[in-house]
Image: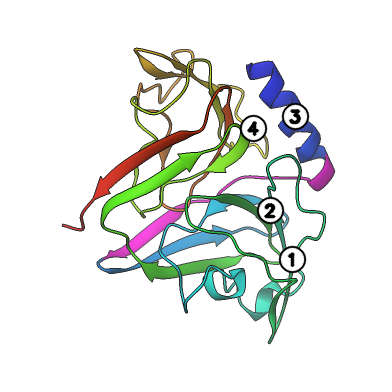
Amino acid sequence: MRTKITALLGLAAVAVGLSTAQAQNVYSLNVVGYVNVTLTDGQFSFLSYPFQDVNGNFDITNTLPVGDVQTGAVLYQWLGTQWNPNNPTWYAGYGWYPDVIISNGVGFFILPAATSTLTMVGQVQQGAISYTIPTGLSTLANMVPVSTNFPTAAVGNNADNMLTWGPGQEWNPNAWTYYAGYGWDNGGNPGDSADGPLLNPGDAVFYENTAGAIPFTQNFTVQ
């Protein structure tokens, strides 16, 4: 299964030239949260929006305002079987065009036009937060801006796989596999945890669900 997911996403990576998520910094974790993400010129970042919607919807011009310096930046959205062929591009004074909707808990790639800081702002969800991982390939991310192993040892179908994006501008070779009754395993490599990879705020993974859809609930309260 690791070969399958790596081959599929490898082809996608060649097509769009994907890259890595940069260092994140959360400087507020109140009801309203802020996450800073460093965008590096010429490098792709695999990100997520870890908040509730802004201005009433998840339109990327509202949730991902990269700023005038990023004119020409491109966003890549996974559609379940392929990358969106109509890649939104950022235009100074206007925003992303064409607009797309990317909810929280979903991963995407950005190719920036310059090195800068992307600040994502929104309400931090609290209480019982519902997720559903569909069958097949999808992106997955934590819906709240915390650093934690995700999605926990209780979530997965036997033989499911996850890939994280590495600092070398490629998918990390140490894929994560789910073993029923145990949890997640990356072959004993650094960071191995039955709860899955450590995701910082704004990180995302690619998930291969080998069986039925997986609904699960995360309980979270701002302290």
User: What percent of the width, then of the height, locates residue 157?
Assistant: 47, 21
Q: Quadrant of residue 91?
A: bottom right
Label 1: element kind? loop
Q: Give the residues in magenta.
A: 15-29
Q: Are marks 1 and 4 in contact (CB under 8 Å)?
A: no
Q: Nearer the viewer, residue 217 or 176?
A: 217
Q: Residues within 10 Å of mark 4 (few under 14, many from 20)?
A: many
In this view, which residue lies farthest toward the front? 212
Q: Looking at the image, which residue is at 77% across and 60% down?
A: 87
Residue bearing mark 2: 77
* Residue 14 is covered by the magenta coloring: no
Q: Earlier in the sequence, mark 3 or mark 1?
A: 3
Residue bearing mark 4: 171
Q: Residues within 10 Å of mark 3 (few under 14, many from 20)?
A: few
Cα distance between the residues tagged 2 and 1: 9 Å
Residue bearing mark 3: 8
Q: Earlier in the sequence, mark 2 or mark 1?
A: 2
In this view, which residue lies farthest toward the left? 223
Cα distance between the residues tagged 3 and 4: 12 Å
Q: Are marks 3 and 4 in contact (CB under 8 Å)?
A: no
User: What percent of the width, then of the height, locates residue 168?
Assistant: 64, 36
Cα distance between the residues tagged 3 and 2: 15 Å
**In the image, is residue 88 above or below residue 212?**
below
Label 3: element kind? helix
Split into 4 quadrants, where in the image is the C terminus?
Answer: bottom left
Residue type indicated by callout 4: Trp
Question: Residue 98 vs residue 63: left or right?
Answer: right
**In the image, is residue 5 above or below residue 97?**
above
